[in-house]
Image (cartoon, rainbow, N blue to C red):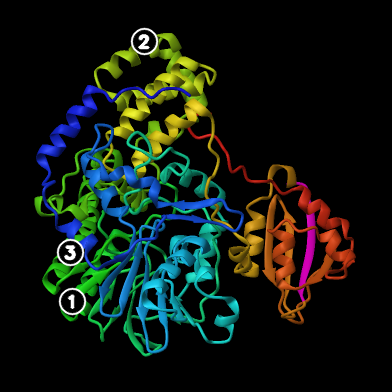
Amino acid sequence: MVEQAPVSDTVRAAHLRAAQEMPLADGQDFADARRGFVATLDPGVVRNEAGDVVWDSDGFGFLEEDCPESVHPSLWRQSRLCAMQGLFAVTDGIYQVRGLDLSNMTFVEGDTGVVVIDPLISAETAAAGLGLYRRHRGERPVTAVIFTHSHIDHFGGVKGVTTEADVAAGRCPILAPAGFVEHAVAENVYAGTAMARRAAYMYGAALPRGPRGSVGAGLGPTTSTGTPTLISPTVHIDHTGQTETVDGVEIEFQMTPGTEAPSEMNFHFPGKRALCMAENATHTLHNLLTLRGALVRDPHVWSKYLTESINTFASRSDVLFASHHWPTWGTERLTEFLALQRDLYGYLHDQTLRALNKGSTGMEIAEDFALPPAIEQAWHTHGYYGSVSHNVKAIYQRYMGWFDGNPSSLWQHPPVESATRHVEFMGGADAVIAKARESFAAGDFRWVAQVLNYVIFADPGNAEAQALQADTLEQLGFGSENGPWRNFFLTGAYELRHGPVGTPTVAASPDIAAALSVEQVFDAAALRVDGPRAWDAHLTIDWRLTDSGAVHRTELRNGLLVHFDVPPGARNPAADATFSMTKADLIGAVVGGADLGRMIADGRVTADGDVGTLAELVGYLDSPHPDFAIVTP
């Protein structure tokens, strides 16, 4: 095991300054996070059916100690708050389980049972949370489930709290915002492999837990590694002001598409004077472009929706809770909380655009961006999960794209070729490393990381450069107030020393695959076509779905897999082959890795025409690489 380097004087001094400047004696958040405590899950370990640990909140017990020099004091404070685990009363008839996954699970008691809001990432952690609730509130049946939005930490554990049979029978409706399934599935399938690999960095799932490793992700402790599931919603919320009564509980909804998720909603419980803000207002600056990858979110509309929330719900609410962190009590306090969150996203947007229109690039704007004192001084606006730096760059990207307008940036060499030329210009690897050591000693870790990256990409076998880069990334991690930044830096250091950690968490699952539309099934296949190898191929296959009667045609030409529904009676050229099967078997055959030949032999699929056409098509499909390199070429 390679020993980590000691914390540098530069980082130690920065932490001391931060501790002196921040009101660390302010205990309001700790009082709020402890309020309503009922019980913890003891021990705080959740296992799957095979006995493997998929969640361990006890592993964060070290956070009860004093802040060490290897963690930013503000992040240590946030991590302690996020690690508080157990069942908590929010208000009369509303309870939350916190600290059993990245997100919270909320229980709203109805006339005959309990409504579950956001059942975590994994079925195992959701079941454990429900069990904790029932041990203290009775064996209430789950009478409804609400998904606040389309990210997996808010729906993945649904089969830990209900069953497809209960949903199908109407005993447990599932409510979700319009577009939920489309966005939930697309995010985990289209770019799922790359996002999951980068999520390993973002959440630090492979890092040892402790003061010199993972201390949390700012939004929550980390991600569970159990079984992600999905049951499609049965009630779709499609407009603001829509009201639904579920198990005797009245709920008023506000649609907020394009904020923290493409499909998201807030909602209010008039009878309980309680407001759920989903993930649109939590105790952190959120991401406008998450480091794992996603579509760039819109801070302008985000800010406007928060204004709407204030005007619509604040005066009618005594408590605000969300899908992460702890609640805020009192009408005046929650109104100011929402107003500061609104001001935060609106200010980021408007001031970035102001600077952009004066010719500054995203990197330049981010470097000198200052928040108003009232926003800066609030704990819940700190960049524990998102950051001012990468959010400003995201806003620039949203409006202007990757190009900074300078012609010299228009056609630069890719990383390896650029690195090779940089190192040559700088006098060779030995000279670069020697100068980098001087910069390391001076505490200029940002520069060291940049120039050593050139050496590593130009000379991947240079062990000295990799060792110094690992030390450098560690110092950057130790100094980060932002949880994902810390995890990215420390995971990069870990991989340089020990090799790739792969993808500890799994986003795709059979349930998510089963929710694909036919269009999405073939979109996913089209993304895997090795275009250059398929330039000269021309193949046409019709896929007849026996459970719906629909026919979908795929045509491979010019390296592109074109696909479309065939209207009844349409006169298209004859297909090379036709396969008839159910939608479930189509999903299994195209994206699930099922053996179509065996399915034909078993009689589940019938085939007409040149059956070999399918084998030829499959031969042009590439496979994603879930362990691709990040800190090395």
Against 407, residue 624 (above or below) is: below
Q: Label 3 to label 2, Cα distance in Å? A: 50 Å
In the rendered structure, which disc, 2 or 1, sits on the residue that comes first in sequence? 1
Against 233, residue 448 (above or below) is: above
Type of the residue with mark 2 = Ala
In the rendered structure, which disc, 3 or 1, sits on the residue that comes first in sequence? 1
Residue under the image location 9 percent in, 50 percent down: 373
Type of the residue with mark 1 = Asp
Q: Which label sits on residue 434? A: 2
Q: Report whether 527 appears left or right of 574.
A: left
Q: Which residue is mark 3?
A: 337
Total marks drawn? Answer: 3
* Near-viewer residue (499 or 160): 160
Q: Which residues are magenta?
A: 535-545
Q: Label 2 to label 1, Cα distance in Å? A: 61 Å
Type of the residue with mark 3 = Phe
Q: Quadrant of residue 34?
A: bottom left
Residue under the image location 24 percent in, 38 percent down: 72
